[in-house]
Image (tube, rainbow, N blue to C red):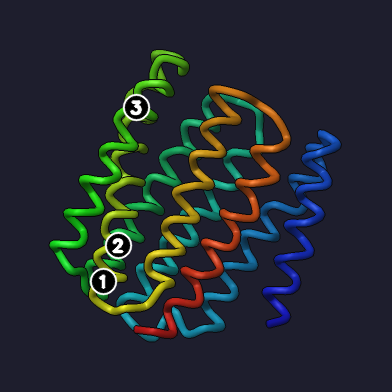
Amino acid sequence: MLIVYFLAALVALLLWCESKGWRSGAWFTKPLASAAFVAFALQMGARQSEYGLWVLTALVACWLGDVLLIPAHQGSFKAGILSFLAGHVFYSVAFLVHGVDARWAMLGAVALACIAWPVGGVLLRSVDRSLRRPVAAYILVISGMLALGVGAWARAQEMVFLVAPAAFYLSDLAVARNRFLAPGFVNRLIGLPLYYAAQLLFAWSVTLA
């Protein structure tokens, strides 16, 4: 649990740095906080199962994405999107490896499509032309990841398979809102705790494999 407490303290410090606009502080706290959820997965035994290895790979991709999103540079932002896109794909594969109820996954996909259509329309009208394809692909992949999480929850009856991807999904919406629609600290105040809680839950879920 020391790693969890360490991560929580770093997230609180990261939020303070973000509220003050202190980029140097973000460079220090964010990579460390993200490294903590990778370490937590290793501590929970991620290397001992196929599901755990896919989760570990996803966590490393997310750690890289966190680092790439720190600079205020569009090229780095695109690379960060691709890294997180890969992370969501790896989580999707992890769910499939663990086992998914196809009927519930399809129901989740239909429900999420009803959300993605209007949300995607608003976002795609707000982003630069060069980012439209990556953003559209991202919306598709995060929706698919959450739908598979619904299917994994239905199959295993473990809430972590529903709560973790849902928290990650909501944190992504907060990032998109901050980047493209309504920048402000409130997006980070909501999105960052959701994001790190999601990664910790994913890391802990390897104990169920």
Q: Quadrant of residue 187?
A: top right
* Residue drawn where x is 49% and y is 60% of the image: 60
Which numbered circle lies on residue 27? none
Q: Is residue 79 above or below residue 47?
A: above
**Does residue 168 lie above or below 202 as drawn?**
above
Q: Amino acid at mark 2?
A: Val
Q: Is residue 118 left or right of residue 14?
A: left
Give how far apart the Cα atoms at labels 1 and 2 are: 6 Å
* Of the pair 41 and 139, the residue shown nearer to us: 139
Question: Could you tell me if the residues under marks 3 and 2 are in contact, i.e. CB atoms within 8 Å?
Answer: no
Crowd tier of the residue under label 2, counting other residues whose Cα lies within 10 Å: few below 14, some 14–19, many 20 or above: many
N-term-proximal mark, 3 vs 2: 3
Task: Please say if the residues under marks 1 and 3 sit with CB atoms less than 8 Å apart.
Answer: no
Q: Tag 2's secondary structure? A: helix
Amino acid found under the numbered disc labelled 3: Pro
Residue topped by disc 3: 118
How far, Cα to Cα, is label 1 from label 3?
27 Å
Mark 1 highlights which residue? 154
In this view, 146 is above or below 126: below
Image coordinates of residue 65 in percent, x first then y, are 52, 46
Task: Inspect the image, locate mark 1, and give the three-letter code of the amino acid beneath it.
Answer: Ala
Image quarter in which the C terminus is found: bottom left
Question: Which residue lies at the image location 56% right of the left edge and 37% below the top edge?
Answer: 175
| Crowding at mark 3 (Cα within 10 Å: few <14, some 14-19, many 20+) | few
Rendered view: 123 above or below 89 = above
* Element marked by disc 3: helix
Proximity of marks 1 and 2: CB atoms separated by less than 8 Å: yes
Distance (Cα) linking label 3 and label 2 = 21 Å
Badge 1 marks a residue whose secondary structure is helix
Which residue, given by chain and number where applicable, does mark 2 sit on? Answer: 150
